[in-house]
Amino acid sequence: MKTDEPMFLLDDLQSLLEKQIELARKSNFRRVEALADRSNSVIEEIAVSKQYNTPQFSDQRKHIADLHKKFQLILTAGKDTLSGQLKQIGNVRKTLKAYRNSG
């Protein structure tokens, strides 16, 4: 492993999370999912290396953990919004069905 590879992997993961956050805010969940596959690959590479548990990377690990929490919150909010929209659609369908059946 090259000496700069650990930093590159952490930088790559950080960049991917930042892009996922931006895309999730725009409700572009297909791209979020595509980037998740890349993120998982980087995470697997990081997990194999024991170099990331050193104090040298503690600040970046903390920043990545904070980004991950932010990303989870955005996804949860998006899920809640979609759930509400689906409920509204269901109510509209029921109303339309009731109108059709009453005529």
Image (cartoon, grey):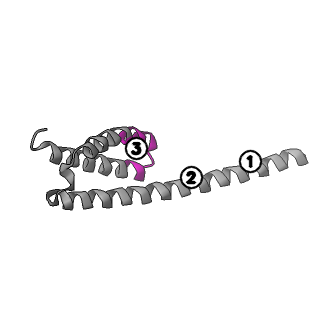
Specify which label sits upstream in the sequence, 1 or 2.
2
Give the magenta-colored segment's residue range: 23-36
Q: Is residue 6 magenta?
A: no
Identify the residue under disc 2: 82
Percent of width and height locating residue 91? 72, 53
Task: Using the numbered discs, state the Cα–Cα distance from disc 2 to disc 3 in whole angstroms.
Answer: 16 Å
Q: Is residue 27 magenta?
A: yes
Identify the residue under disc 1: 93
Mark 2 closeness class: few <14, some 14–19, many ≥20 residues within 10 Å:
few
Residue kind at label 2, given as amino acid type = Leu
User: In the image shown, does 24 or 63 lie closer to the viewer?
Assistant: 63
Which numbered tag is attached to residue 32? 3
Name the residue located 61 percent from the left edge and 57 percent from the top edge. Answer: 84
Residue kind at label 1, given as amino acid type = Arg
Which mark's residue is nearer the viewer, 1 or 3? 3
Looking at this view, name the residue that lies furthest to the right. Answer: 103
